[in-house]
Amino acid sequence: MKKDVLINIKGIYANDEDRDEIEIFTIGEYYQKDGDYYICYEESESTGFEGSRTTLRVEQEERVTLRRCGAANSQLIVEQGVRHQCHYDMGFGELMIGVLGNSIKSDLGEHGGSLAFKYSLDINMMLASENEMYINIRES
């Protein structure tokens, strides 16, 4: 059963030159299916992906798959210790990037909870950025 939830997302992106933090609050849907948790929300102008819908599939503390559909279409797979080749639409062009999962921590349950994951992005095997995502889910 899908629940309406309040979602707080904090992202930290760092490379050799700078570090950037973004925090958004939005509403969305949250549900469990076949043992996995799903977090869905509409992107806004503030994220740069307005017109897209993002779905996070959380497979315990093993894997997080981010799918963005609409104006920008992307898929990132974060799995601890595994490097995946993923399709990423930057809004102005598409890239194939490497995603290496560094850690995943989830305490998601029936009523919400939190999810944190860290990953590295590379382009042509050269490190592009180190990333951290912190997501909190509360029933509205």
Image (cartoon, rainbow, N blue to C red):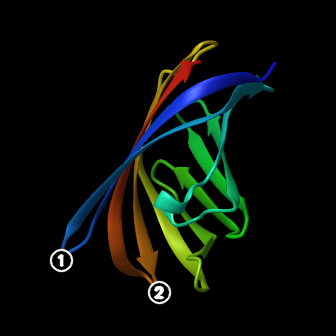
Q: Which quarter of the rendering shows the N terminus?
A: top right
| Mark in the foreground, 1 or 2 | 1
Q: Please give left or right for residue 7 compared with residue 31 in the image.
A: left
Residue 14 image offset from top left, x and y in percent:
26, 65
Say if 82 sits above or below 115 in the image: below
Instruction: Specify few, some or many for label 1: CA neighbours under 10 Å numbering under 14, 14-19, or 20 or more.
Output: few
Q: Which residue is mark 1?
A: 17
Say if 130 sits above or below 115 in the image: below
Marker count (numbered): 2
Residue 83 image offset from top left, x and y in percent:
51, 63
Instruction: Specify few, some or many for label 2: CA neighbours under 10 Å numbering under 14, 14-19, or 20 or more.
Output: few
The earlier-in-sequence mark between 1 and 2 is: 1
Q: Please give left or right for residue 127 compared with residue 121 in the image.
A: left
Q: Secondary structure at mark 2?
A: loop
Q: Residue furthest top?
A: 111
- Tell which of 52 and 118 is nearer to you: 52
Task: Give the residue type at disc 2.
Answer: Asn
Say if 46 sits above or below 114 in the image: below
- Tell which of 20 and 60 is nearer to you: 20
Q: Residue furthest left?
A: 17
Residue under the point 47% across and 47% down = 80
Q: Do residues under tags 1 and 2 come within 8 Å of each other at their CB atoms?
A: no
Residue under the point 60% across and 56% down = 77
Q: Which quarter of the rendering shows the C terminus?
A: top right
Task: Give the residue type at disc 1.
Answer: Glu
Residue under the point 80% across and 26% down = 34
Q: Cα distance, mark 1 to mark 2?
A: 19 Å
* Whether residue 105 is visible: no
* Whether residue 73 is visible: yes
| Disc sitting over residue 124 in the figure | 2
